[in-house]
């Protein structure tokens, strides 16, 4: 049995293992343990949410620059989006506007890794925190693009339930966050060219937004998407993982609980936990990365549930496949940049290969970069400069090429 080190977005695919372990066919709906509301009530939905269009701005507020950021103005936007069941939700976007930006200058939608079940872990909260548990890893990259005069929009792509693991939800929220940013007149990006970028968990939200655009938001002027280290097939990754106790088991367990928040009638995990599982669930309810890792360290799926019945629930498999980009028939409308390690131990590289081959066959202009590293997080650092340079060319109107 292989034991894999779990990190970043790849860990959320372990949710499929846990889901398959705990869910049997024909189970009744559970009562997921939702995140506790935070004191900042900005994200509360209005009573008339259903009458709004996806991407409509509900409310806005100016914010001071987060620590470590300079010469920018910051807005937070609450906007209408759509959850995994197709119902309206209120979501939040943080927009950083460089003071040297030109009207209708480039707009980058940047998705970062969020390994969390708590609302305070979302970018709209974590950017202003001095707690290292909430640190934003991508701050250096954000500063670099802000210095170029790009406006940066950062969505809370796990949504109002902090549904860690629900990747398609993230894509929908990202597209609606772009709509909201462009509909908010003070930012002056109504006619801007837009690009998407993200790695690992952020890469998965980016990949989903790119794949969904034709069907969900075809009017957006997205000139390119750069996604790195993104798991493309959650079921396949789940089948590659084992059930031995692991120091990073907490991330897998948290992701399973996050998916349940979006699919409570299809993946009723909470109703099948044993006392230890319920105890760990309660510790994770509002956890960020370090809290989640600590709560589940050294545990396994066997220890949190009474029985294991692998992959016997068609509803579970369907829900996992609904969040796997490889299984989605749509293709990006804009050119696509993808980078990963060819020997990444955390994600099924064959699923990336299959997805890219399908995109190439459909005529998408794909640039694929295989980074010379077998470490998931090192590959992020090595590939990001090339991704940003590729995006810069798209903003400049340079025609995209392909290495399909």
Image (cartoon, rainbow, N blue to C red):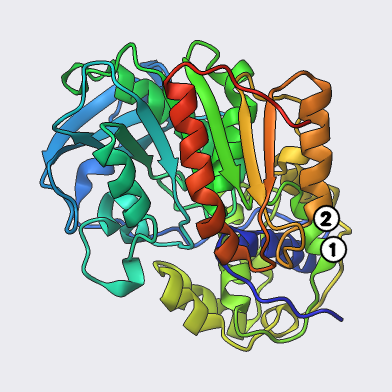
Q: Is residue 193 left or right of residue 273?
A: left
The quadrant holding residue 270 is bottom right
Q: Nearer the viewer, residue 58 or 131?
A: 131
Against 78, is 278 above or below?
below
What mark, if any, has residue 236 been given in the picture? 2
Residue 37 image position (x, y, % from top left): 30, 56
Q: Is residue 221 left or right of residue 189?
A: right
What mark, if any, has residue 101 been given in the picture? none
Residue 63 image position (x, y, % from top left): 13, 43
Against 161, is 219 above or below?
above
Q: Is residue 362 visible?
A: yes
Q: Nearer the viewer, residue 123 or 381?
A: 381
Name the element at disc 2.
helix
The residue at 41%/68% (across/down) is: 288
Q: Is residue 286 left or right of residue 227?
A: left
Q: Residues within 10 Å of mark 2 (few under 14, many from 20)?
A: many
Q: Quadrant of the C terminus?
A: top right
Disc 2 + disc 1, Cβ < 8 Å:
yes
Residue 384 image position (x, y, % from top left): 50, 49
Q: Nearer the viewer, residue 152 or 41?
A: 152
What mark, if any, has residue 239 been given in the picture? 1
**Distance between the alpha carbons at the discs numbered 2 and 1:** 5 Å
Q: Is residue 44 visible?
A: no
The quadrant holding residue 72 is top left
The residue at 63%/77% (across/down) is: 249
The residue at 76%/45% (across/down) is: 352
Residue 395 image position (x, y, % from top left): 43, 23
């Amino acid at each position: 049995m292989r034991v894999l080190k779990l990190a970043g977005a790849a860990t959320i695919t372990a949710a499929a293992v846990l889901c398959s372990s705990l869910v049997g066919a024909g189970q009744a709906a559970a009562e997921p343990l939702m995140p506790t509301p935070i004191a900042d009530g900005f994200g509360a939905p209005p009573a008339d949410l259903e009458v709004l269009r996806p991407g409509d701005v509900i409310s806005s507020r100016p914010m001071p620059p987060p620590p470590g950021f300079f010469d920018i103005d910051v807005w937070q936007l609450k906007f209408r989006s759509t959850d995994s069941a197709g119902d309206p939700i209120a979501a939040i976007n943080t927009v950083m506007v460089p003071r040297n930006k030109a009207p209708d200058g480039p707009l980058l939608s940047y998705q970062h890794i969020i390994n969390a079940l708590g609302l305070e872990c979302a970018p709209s909260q974590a950017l202003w925190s001095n707690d290292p548990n909430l640190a934003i890893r991508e701050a250096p990259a954000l500063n670099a693009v802000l210095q170029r005069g790009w406006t940066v929009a950062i969505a809370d792509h796990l949504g109002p339930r902090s549904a860690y693991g629900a990747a398609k939800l993230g894509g929908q929220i990202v597209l609606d966050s772009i709509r909201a940013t462009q509909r908010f007149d003070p930012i002056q990006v109504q006619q801007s060219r837009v690009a998407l970028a993200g790695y690992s968990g952020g890469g998965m939200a980016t990949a989903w937004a790119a794949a969904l655009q034709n069907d969900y938001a075809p009017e957006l002027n997205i000139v390119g998407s750069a996604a790195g280290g993104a798991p493309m097939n959650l079921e396949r990754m789940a089948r590659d993982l084992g059930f031995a106790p692991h120091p990073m088991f907490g991330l897998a367990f948290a992701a399973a609980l996050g998916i349940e928040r979006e699919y409570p009638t299809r993946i009723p995990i909470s109703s099948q936990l044993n006392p230890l599982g319920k105890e760990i669930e309660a510790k994770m309810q509002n956890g960020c990365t370090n809290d989640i890792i600590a709560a589940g360290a050294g545990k396994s799926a066997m220890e949190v549930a009474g029985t294991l019945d692998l992959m016997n629930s068609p509803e579970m498999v369907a829900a996992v496949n609904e969040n796997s980009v490889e299984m989605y028939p749509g293709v990006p409308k804009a050119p696509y940049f993808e980078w990963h390690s060819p020997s990444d131990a955390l994600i099924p590289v064959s699923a990336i290969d299959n997805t890219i081959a399908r995109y190439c066959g459909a005529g998408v202009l794909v640039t694929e970069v295989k980074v010379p590293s077998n470490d998931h997080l090192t590959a992020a650092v090595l590939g990001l400069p090339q991704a940003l340079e590729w995006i810069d060319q798209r903003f400049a109107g340079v025609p995209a090429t392909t290495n399909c």
